[in-house]
Amino acid sequence: MSDIYIRTTGRAGRITLTRPQALNALSYDMCMAIDTALRNWREDDAVDLIIFDAEGEKAFCAGGDIAELYYFGTKGDYTFGRRFWRDEYRMNALIYEYSKPVISFLQGFTMGGGVGIGCHGSHRIVGDSSQIAMPECSIGLIPDVGGSLMLAQAPGRMGEYLGTTGYRMGPGDAIYAGFADYYIPQNIWPELIELLEASGRAELVSEHGQTAPAAALADQQARVDTIYEGKTLADVLISLRNADDDFSTKTLTVLNRNSALSMACTIEMLHQLRGEGLTVRKALEMEYRYTFRAMEHGDILEGIRAQIIDKDRNPQWQYSDMNVPAGAVLEMLRPLGRDALSFAEE
């Protein structure tokens, strides 16, 4: 497949995304190729570790290839999207639970679907160009691909802030928020990959790790915790509208551009997930409740139209007044019954 290069080199299973012209956007076929390779290598004693990387300087993977979702969804066919998300989420869980070290090199943009393959491994490496984000609320979705797991585990209420604003985390921020583990200058990456291939020793990653740049998010932690201390989107908006500091003003401007339904559901989802008993499967199952319904009842088709298809950047969201009924949130996140996400291998 020309979009992805999968092979074994030395002691390493290698997965390289090769769509730099499309910012390495992840297609359904790419997801399935990754899934197959990981299942094969899991039982291969000749493979000690897995390495994810990507071609191009701009992006590891800027997200999922969502144009196809729009094509089918606007025709009333929601089956493709549901299958895409179902199988992608199973692959995300496979990476998170993998029995061998999974090492990812995350240059440039790592967003949405890129987080799902790049930020669930055991050794997540960032460099100076890294920008990691969950911007789904800007297209009428919620943070998914297991991203809600990291958001729920982020310090304080930082997860709600990152999930509703889509803030782009630099290397220091990504490590602070729990989306990455190691800062290693990018000029060292090729040599490190060769060493990993030859030795099969994942501990070489920590040996090459350096002090990360300062995390700007850490300076805003107390403010974020205050803004997002309420239980609902309405609480957050009241807090922001009553504030007069620059950070609150900028945050409110961003929220006013996004889908209110998506943001309200993101906040509720994180409140439900946070605490003891949180697993990647629980997070993915909760996300799938929303994405299963997203095209039929959510804002995603309008979001894709405005951002990707017509590119007018003027989405006509449901609840444009930002007043989302509690019942609408509960409806999007209620259990799916027999349609619930299953992790049984087929």
Image (tube, rainbow, N blue to C red):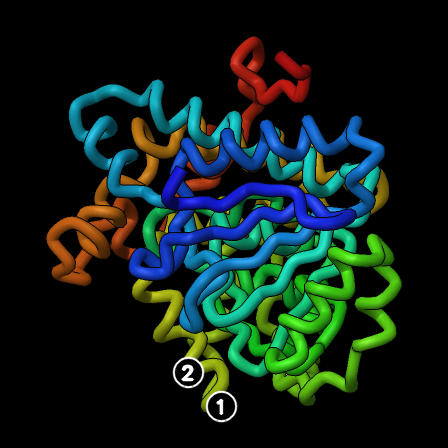
Where is residue 26 drawn, in percent x and y? 42, 45
- Position of the C terminus, as image quadrant, is top right
> Which residue has dot 1 on it?
245
Quadrant for residue 39, please give it. Answer: top right
For the N terminus, the quadrant is: top left
Disc 2/disc 1 C-alpha distance (Å): 6 Å
Q: Secondary structure at mark 2?
A: helix
Crowdedness near tag 2: few (<14), some (14–19) or many (≥20) residues, C-alpha within 10 Å: some
Q: Which amino acid does the dot numbered 2 rest on?
A: Thr
Tag shown at residue 139:
none
For residue 341, above or below residue 233 = above
Q: Would residue 156 be seen by someone viewing this image from the given angle? A: no
**Residue at 80% across, 67% down:** 205
Q: Quadrant of residue 241?
A: bottom left
Left or right? Give the position of 311 relative to 266: left
Residue 131 percent coordinates (x, y):
51, 72
Asked which secondary structure carries label 1, the reply is loop
Q: Quick check: marks 2 and 1 in contact, CB under 8 Å? A: yes
Q: Is residue 88 visible?
A: yes
Residue 276 vs 267, above or below: the answer is above
* Residue 249 tag number: 2
Q: As rendered, which of 216 and 209 lies closer to the eye? A: 209
Eyeballing the image, is 72 above or below 58? above
Amino acid found under the numbered disc labelled 1: Asp
Q: Nearer the viewer, residue 200 or 169?
A: 200
Label 1 CA crowd tier, 10 Å (few <14, some 14–19, many 20+): few
Name the residue rendered at 70%, 78% in the picture. Answer: 184
Residue at image point 47% right, 31% down? 85
Residue 93: % across, % down: 67, 35
Q: Is 31 on the left or on the right of 226, as rendered?
A: left
In the rendered picture of this protein, how many numbered marks are placed on residues?
A: 2
